[in-house]
Structures are given as structure tokens and as C-alpha cells.
Amino acid sequence: MTDRRRFRHTALAAALVLAVAAGCTDDPAPADEAGDAPQVIAPGRPGEEAGTLSPEEAREAGGEGTEPTASDFAFMRMMVEHHEQAVEMTGLAEQHAEDGRVRRLSERIAAAQGPEIEAMNAWLTRNAGHEADAGHGGHDPTAMPGMASAEELAELTAARGEAFDELFLDLMVRHHEGGVSMAADALAGAGDVTVEQLANDIVATQTVEIERLEELR
């Protein structure tokens, strides 16, 4: 990825975080010392300090004007559900896992996917007016690979000790592999730069987590 492309992604991600944070509070976003509009923090390249952008600059850097595709909407809606199940499973791990390493890894998974759920829901809300124009990409839950069945979740809920750890690791490896597959498919049809960035992040993060899950398994 070029430095220019990476900067566009970073700026847009920062703007998205700001939008999510603003939506979670009734207080106005902080303004700069001159009383102007809130500034967006844009992390610098390796070895460089972070800078700031105005909301207008962040939108321009993020590629304002790119049109979401039907595939973008389908991916975001399905990935919200996919992540929600992962968070549900990690919640069970925090309660019932015997191996402390399994609990710690489950906490890291939840810490990554919880904010991503908020970001995806914020994107869907912000782009709701464009969904009809994009057409329908189809939101078919059966198209979400890696999802645990109701029976598997019930078994995981009832399991304890080593039996829980083994089942959790098996289900989460499969779940993550499904998430990586969905994100890779989304990259092929992505029209919106936020969707592209999120899909890239999911591929990178969950690939590393799969390796760790496999080590524990």
C-alpha cells in the first residue's frame, strides 16, 4: 500500500472514530483553541508524530465521493452479525474458560470486534440514504461462513473446563476463517474506502488471531 493510500485510510478511520464517539454522547465535540471546528487526529507515518485534520480535510483525504456498492452494504450488515456472535462466544470464554491464555485471547478478540461493530453500525446509519441507489446485494445469513449453529452455541454454553477450551478454540478458528473469507470477498467488490479499510483490517487482525488460536489448540 502506498504512503498516500495509507494516509487516506488512516484519516478516514480517524474520522469514523470521531463520528462514532460523537454519536455516543450529547456533549459537543471539543473545538481547537481558536474555537474552530473539532480537529481529527491523523496518526503519522512510522517515526513521525501525529497531526490533525479539519473534518473537511479528513473527508477529502478519505476519498469523499466514493459510492458504496450493494456488496458494501451486504458485507457491513452481515459482518455486524458475524462479529456479534464472536463477542457472544468470547463472553462465554471469560466466564468458563479454564486456560488463562484462552481467556486473555478472548478478551483481545472482543476488544477488537466491539469497536468494529460500532463503526460498522455508524457507517450503515450514515449511508442509509444511499442504500436504495446501490441496489440490493442480498443479506443472506446462510452466506456467512464460520458461524456457529444454535446447537453448537448451546453446547459451548454448557461446557466447562478443558472441554470448554477445546470447543471454543475449534469454533473460533472456524469463525475467524469465515470472517477472513468474507472480508476477502468484500475487497473484490468494495466501492467505499471505509469498507475496503475495514475488510483489510479484518483480514490482517484475524489471520494473526487464527495463528494464536491454532497454537493454543
Image (tube, rainbow, N blue to C red):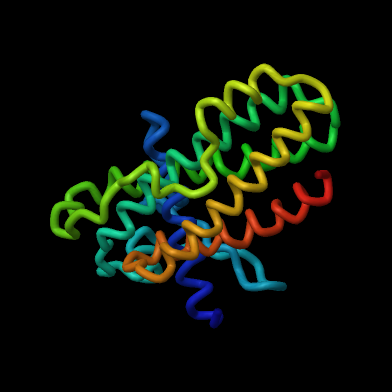
Residue under the image location 55 percent in, 57 percent down: 180
In this image, 98 relative to 34: left or right? Answer: right
| In the rendered image, the vertical position of residue 86 relative to residue 201, given as above or below | above
Task: Point out the image quarter for the N terminus.
Answer: bottom right
Q: Quadrant of residue 89?
A: top right
Residue 216 or residue 38, whichever sits in front = 216
Determine if residue 21 is in view.
Answer: no
Whether residue 205 is visible: yes
Residue at the farthest front position: 151
Residue 98 is situated, as x and y percent measured from the top left of the image, at 83, 25
* Residue 148, percent from left and from top: 54, 36
Query: Which residue occupies 42% across, 42% down?
Result: 20
The answer to whether 126 is drawn above or below residue 69 in the figure is above
**On the picture, is 180 further left or further right than 79?**
right
Q: Nearer the viewer, residue 49 or 176?
A: 176
Position of the C terminus by quadrant: top right
Query: Compared to 153, does 80 lie above or below?
Result: below
Residue located at (85% from left, 31% from top): 99
- The residue depicted at 56 percent of the width and 43 percent of the height is 113
Using the image, determine if residue 17 lies above or below residue 81.
below
Residue 61 as seen in the image, left or right of residue 114:
left
Image position, residue 115 (x, y; %): 52, 42
